[in-house]
Image (tube, grey):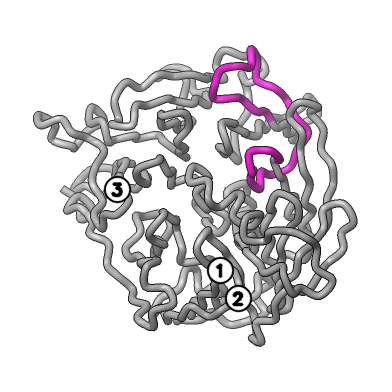
């Protein structure tokens, strides 16, 4: 329970990580940088669906054609099931990932039921998910596995199993995360003196590693395909970049937990005190790009099509929870594209309602443990007619 709480707090701190795009032509002290291109360098890669703000991150994965999501489905007089759903880009309907006409969709034989699945990703034309299970009915030690699945939910193959390695015989697993074809996790165990020890390992989904590799890194922040970023959410949040070839970690900078941060290819973009800055990786120098003019606590996220600045509350508990949340949308030139007021919040305003992003939609949820219930159509940005649309969910959401 303590480890889950630490994970939740870490995820809340990571909520400050947004995706930002900025204007370069008339920046004070600006560099010769195509800000739009750089700011989109991570977010436009659809397989890296935006999970920065999700307390239950890893429940979404994007393919070239649509978005997958894990969701617990209640059943009368039975335990809930973890079910895989799919929403095609351009559609407003979520469906089970099971096409078998003879399937009743009510037990683990269903292609859509991934009962022990924890997190998912889409890589190299396949879905992958991790699960932690008992080794057997008589062996109560835990095993962490990575399973590869066809896009239609069939042909499940275990590609990694910690049970094969003696160093994982006694202990516990935590902080699993997929990123750009890599899988990271932490292993916890007690030494002979009873003190808890921890080691991070990583595995490559292409099978190119013959052994699980121990690495000295904190928590995964994200990757742009060239650089892999990590963060350490202590009293201050320490950011660093990792080189997998050299197996080395280089510190970048330290920020307040309230500061939103996006790692682009050449610079970071941060929002602090409701002002957006570009931060140089090498020198740490900050250049003011945009003053939102807002007061109070706000968070920033950005996508290939827009920047989102939204209401929030301080992580330290010094501000009361809010019952409504305003999302303000800007172009990459910081031109206003409209705003929308939600009559709900996630965790009283601590977290973002944006659960995932597709080429044409922003998906919103009232609870990130479940499927998104609403979406914003990007085509409406800047039209003066920004609307919250309802996502059509299957009847299975109500149980069977």
Residue wearing tag 1: 307
- Nearer to me, 323 or 67: 67
Task: State the residue position of label 2.
Answer: 334
Q: CA distance from mark 3 to mark 2?
A: 30 Å
Q: Determine whether, in the image, residue 109 is placed left or right of residue 284.
A: left
Mark pair 2, 1: CA separation: 8 Å
Provide the residue designation for mark 3: 88
Foreground of the two, 331 or 144: 331
Label 3 crowd bin: few (<14), some (14–19), many (20+), radius 10 Å? some
The residue that appears at 40% across and 76% down in the rendered structure is: 344
Task: Determine the image quadrant of residue 36.
Answer: bottom right
Q: Residue at x 65, y 15 (%)?
A: 211
The answer to whether marks 2 and 1 mark residues whose Cβ atoms lie closer than 8 Å is: yes
Q: Nearer the viewer, residue 79 or 185?
A: 185
Residue extent of the magenta highlight: 201-227
Q: Nearer the viewer, mark 2 or mark 1?
A: 2
């Amino acid at each position: 329970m303590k480890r889950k709480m630490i994970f939740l707090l870490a995820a809340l701190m990571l909520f400050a990580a947004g995706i930002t795009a900025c204007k370069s032509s008339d920046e004070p002290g600006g560099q010769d940088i195509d800000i739009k291109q750089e700011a989109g360098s991570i977010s436009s890669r659809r397989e890296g669906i935006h999970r920065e703000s999700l307390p239950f991150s890893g429940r979404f994965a994007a393919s070239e054609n649509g978005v997958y999501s894990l969701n617990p489905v209640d059943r009368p007089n039975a335990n809930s099931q973890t079910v895989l759903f799919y929403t095609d880009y351009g559609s407003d309907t979520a469906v089970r990932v099971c096409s078998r006409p003879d399937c009743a969709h009510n037990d683990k034989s269903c292609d859509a039921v991934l009962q022990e699945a924890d997190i998912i990703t889409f890589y190299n034309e396949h879905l992958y998910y991790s699960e932690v299970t008992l080794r057997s009915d008589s062996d109560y030690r835990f095993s962490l596995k990575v399973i590869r699945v066809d896009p239609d939910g069939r042909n499940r193959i275990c590609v990694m199993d910690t049970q094969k390695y003696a160093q994982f015989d006694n202990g516990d697993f935590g902080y699993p995360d997929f990123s750009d074809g890599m899988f990271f996790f932490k292993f916890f165990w007690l030494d002979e003196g009873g003190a808890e020890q921890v080691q991070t390992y990583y595995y490559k989904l292409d099978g190119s590693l013959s052994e699980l590799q121990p690495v000295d890194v904190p928590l995964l922040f994200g990757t742009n395909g060239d650089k892999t970023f990590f963060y350490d959410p202590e009293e201050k949040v320490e950011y660093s970049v990792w080189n997998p070839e050299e197996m080395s970690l280089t510190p970048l900078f330290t920020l307040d937990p309230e500061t939103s941060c996006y790692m682009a290819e050449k610079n970071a973009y941060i929002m602090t005190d409701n002002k957006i800055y570009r931060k140089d990786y090498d020198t740490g120098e900050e250049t003011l790009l945009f003053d939102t003019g807002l007061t109070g606590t706000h968070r920033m996220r950005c996508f290939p099509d827009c920047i989102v600045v939204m209401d929030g509350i301080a992580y330290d508990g010094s501000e009361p929870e809010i019952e409504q949340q305003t999302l303000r949308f800007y172009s990459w030139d910081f031109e206003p594209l409209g705003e929308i007021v939600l009559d709900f919040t996630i965790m009283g305003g601590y977290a973002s309602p944006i659960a995932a992003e597709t080429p044409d939609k922003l998906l919103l949820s009232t609870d990130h443990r479940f499927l998104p219930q609403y979406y914003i159509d990007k085509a409406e940005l800047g039209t003066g007619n920004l609307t919250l649309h309802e996502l059509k969910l299957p009847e299975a959401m109500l149980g069977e």
